Amino acid sequence: MQIASLSTEQAPPISVPLRYFAAAPVFLIFSALLLALSGSNPFADLRSGAQIAATHHITLGVMAMVMLGAIQQMLPVVIGSPMPASRIVAWLTFLPLIAGVLLFSASFMLGKMFMLDWAWTLLGLSFLIFIAASLLSLWRATAQNATKTAIFLSIISLAGAVSLGLLLAHGYAAGLPLSYPLLATAHISLALGGWVLLLIIGVSYQVVPMFQLTPNYPKWMTSALAPALFIVLLLKLGLLPFETMPSWSGFFVECLFWLLACSFAVITLKLQSQRRRRVPDAPLSFFRLGMASLLLAAIFSLAALIWPQYSDNLRTLSALAYILGFALSLIQGMLYKIVPFLIWFHLFRGGIKAIKAGVPNMKEIIPEPLMWRHLWLQCATLLTALMAPWSTEVAYLTMLGLLLQGILLAYAIYIGIRVYRHTLKRLMQA
């Protein structure tokens, strides 16, 4: 994928994606503070109120925040179909998402379950507008490529995850007699296995070859991987209500899901080993850490199937490796590439004036040493997180790591925005 092939003339205003990217680190900071306020080791029980609140700060406040901003940038540029009323959609998804996440966490931290009704109303509004606008944009698009397919399937998964999440939230608030473990398992599967994984795959098809200068993903993968993962995910969900089904059926479906997920990680690592430039690159290293974490999450999950007596501990480790290692590493690595590119691209639109004003290149927008410090901090945080369930002291180190990462990422994005504003001022004077 070359920059020249992008529909850059249809790009939304830079304020649309940047508002999401700038808000995400704040929720990473909040997640660390929520964990610290729990009064015990929240990593020892992933079902504790503090852990549920902090997890949703990461999944909704960080991951979904970045993904919503990225999709609103990618649909017009990569797919060639702009979001309808992009500025209005951005505000109507951004503000309710912030308020909904804050109310959601407050309800669990304060033990006020009635607040969940306010939270799910705001979150439902945000995601309903986003999903409707995204599907309309995809329906209008004439381009047919693997990224479009993966994004479409990820948004369908998001719709299912949001629906189940709203049902769970309302059930807790109203005290409804629901099958909470079953619904929670389906909600997590659609959110992490569908929405997050499929979207990362679709974005990687474009970002990895373009920014990391690798060969393109093989055609068999781009044409088959996302649909195959989606079908396997549906099979997995279909087996959940039937406890009488043979145990080997669930074992086979889960093994198939992780096999497909691991094929994405292995092929990505292989392509990165073939990149044209061998210069060390921090965002690339974030990607490699994410792929290694995805493989680790698969190992823990499959081990839980083989040794069911250790299932709870192994699935906890799998969740930590997947969320903090895979998803968070890749999202932060993408931000360190996408934010400088957006700033450079929007400044360089000035043409000759931009050249005279001295538009910085992408490497000059966010300092490379800052990215490397963040990478090593992410490695240390992930390592402590995998030991945190058995040690309160190590758990506090994980919280400190998340706090420092949020501060560092916020500072990096602030530097980028400051460079954009100062250069734009010089450009206007020119």
Image (tube, grey):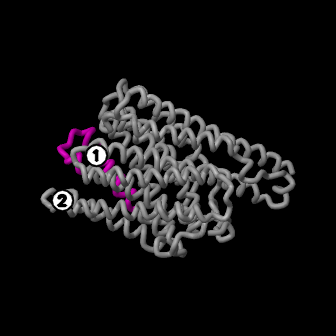
User: Which residue is drawn at the image coordinates 22% and 48% (left, top)?
Assistant: 308
Residue 150, given in percent of the width and then of the height, sits at 46, 66
* Quadrant containing the N terminus in the rendered view: bottom right
Amino acid at circle 2: Ser
**How many C-alpha atoms fall within 10 Å of the one at disc 1: few (<14), some, or many (≥20)?**
many
Q: CA distance from mark 1 to mark 2?
A: 27 Å
Whether residue 258 is situated above or below residue 289 in the rendered picture: below
Residue at which label 1 appears? 168
- Residue 390 image point, x, y percent: 34, 32
Q: Does the stretch in magenta take in 366?
A: no
**From what the image shows, is residue 206 above or below residue 353?**
below
Which marked residue is nearer to the observer: mark 1 or mark 2?
Answer: 2
In the picture, measured across the screen, residue 216 lies left or right of residue 251, that is right
**Residue, x 35% and y 35% (percent of image)?**
389
Residue 204, percent across and down?
53, 61
SS at mark 1?
Answer: helix
Q: Is residue 135 visible?
A: no
Instruction: Using the image as rendered, state which of residue 92 and residue 367 is in the foreground.
Output: 367
- The local crowd at label 2, few if under 14, some if 14 to 19, many if 20 or more residues have their Cα within 10 Å, is few
Viewer-nearest residue: 398 or 238: 398
Where residue 244 sits in the image (x, y, percent)? 12, 59
Secondary structure under tag 2 reads helix
Q: Tag 1: residue type? A: Leu
- Give the vertical position of 318 relative to 160 (above or below): above
Say which residue label 2 marks.
247
Q: Earlier in the sequence, mark 1 or mark 2?
A: 1
Q: Which residues are magenta?
A: 156-182
